[in-house]
Image (cartoon, rainbow, N blue to C red):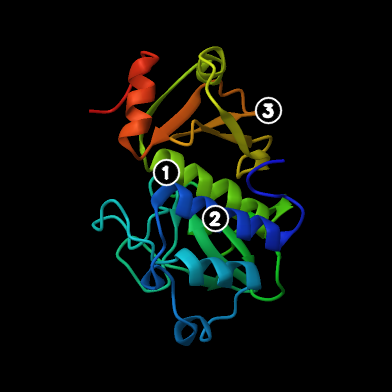
């Protein structure tokens, strides 16, 4: 069974919360938004829960964002920032943006595990955006996105056949999440935890991107990569 159980919204979020503490360390209460802030917003239960748990998890670089999940794409802050924040577009609640502004992700303002819509062809920059609904639910999308940020926000690199290198070396490989849908059509990612110290994702959809991306947070991860002669950031 994957580390993040895909049975329902609660098991996904519970698994994601456990994984974040395993990857980054113990969460502190100030890493989430308090009820006094969240009660002022109309957002679905899944998104409210994640903002309460990790909406203010400290970033690597505070010049870019006020939370940890903004390295590749951006989990939008609740408070207004120079680089943007959450906002309402009619019945949609926009909570995420691609790092170069190519698309944004939105959900509904009500319910628990609502759907996810992605703006088409930069249309969110106009006064009449076009939204394309994904097949996944909000909780499924959040898991895929947050794990992406865990990889891309950590020290690491990319290359072809990296997962097989770990397998050949006899590493312990734990499946974290399988075939999570992301923003582009046919874009799906599977995530793996290697020896509890390297997080890797592989494109498993139709996006024709063959590199395995991986990252590490500890010296154990760096040592593993060096032992296998895999690139590390210095």
**Residue 2 picture quarter:** top right
- Left or right: residue 108 versus residue 197 is right
Residue 21 — which label?
none
For label 2, count other residues whose C-alpha is less than 10 Å away and answer few (under 14), some (14-19) or many (20+).
some
**Circle nearer the N terminus (2, 3):** 2
For marks 3 and 1, the one nearer the N-term is 1
Q: What is the C-alpha distance between the residues marked 3 and 1? A: 20 Å
From the viewer's perspective, is 186 left or right of 18? right
Question: Quick one: SS at disc 3?
Answer: loop
Q: Earlier in the sequence, mark 2 or mark 1?
A: 2
The residue shown at (45%, 39%) is: 151
Residue at x 56% of width, y 24% of height: 209
For residue 206, the mark is 3
- Cα–Cα span, label 2 and label 3: 30 Å
Image vertical order of residue 36 relative to residue 74, above or below: below
Mark 3 burial class by Cα count in 10 Å: few <14, some 14-19, many 20+:
few
Q: Is residue 170 above or below residue 57?
A: above
Q: CA distance from mark 2 to mark 1?
A: 22 Å
Q: Nearer the viewer, mark 2 or mark 1?
A: 2
The residue nearer to you, when weighing 183 against 112, is 112
Q: 98 or 68, which lies in front? A: 68
**Can residue 121 be seen from the camera position used here?**
no
In the rendered image, the quadrant that contains the N terminus is: top right
Mark on residue 72? 1
**Disc 2 target residue:** 18
x then y, percent, for residue 51: 50, 69
Rendering coords of residue 153 (x, y %) = 38, 43
Residue 42 or 158: which is nearer the viewer?
158
């Amino acid at each position: 069974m994957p580390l993040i159980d895909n049975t329902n919204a609660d098991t996904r979020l519970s698994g994601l919360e456990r994984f974040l503490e395993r990857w980054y360390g113990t969460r502190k209460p100030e890493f989430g938004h308090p009820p006094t802030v969240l009660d002022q917003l109309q957002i679905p239960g899944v998104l409210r829960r994640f903002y309460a748990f990790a909406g203010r998890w400290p970033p690597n670089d505070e010049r870019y964002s006020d939370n940890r999940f903004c390295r590749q794409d951006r989990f939008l802050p609740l408070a207004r920032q120079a680089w943007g924040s959450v906002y309402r577009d009619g019945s949609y609640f926009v909570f995420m943006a691609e790092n170069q502004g190519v698309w944004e992700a939105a959900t509904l303002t009500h319910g628990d595990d609502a759907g996810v819509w992605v703006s088409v062809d930069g249309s969110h920059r106009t006064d009449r955006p076009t939204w394309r609904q994904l097949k996944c639910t909000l909780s499924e999308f959040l898991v895929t996105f947050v794990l992406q940020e865990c990889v891309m926000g950590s020290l690491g690199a990319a290359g072809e056949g990296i997962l097989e290198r770990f397998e050949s070396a006899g590493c312990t490989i734990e499946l974290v999440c399988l075939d999570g849908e992301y923003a582009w059509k046919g874009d799906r990612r599977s995530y793996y935890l290697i020896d509890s110290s390297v997080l890797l994702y592989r494109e498993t959809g139709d996006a024709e991107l063959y590199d395995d991306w991986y990252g590490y947070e500890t010296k154990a991860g760096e040592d593993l990569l060096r032992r296998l002669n895999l690139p590390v950031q210095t």
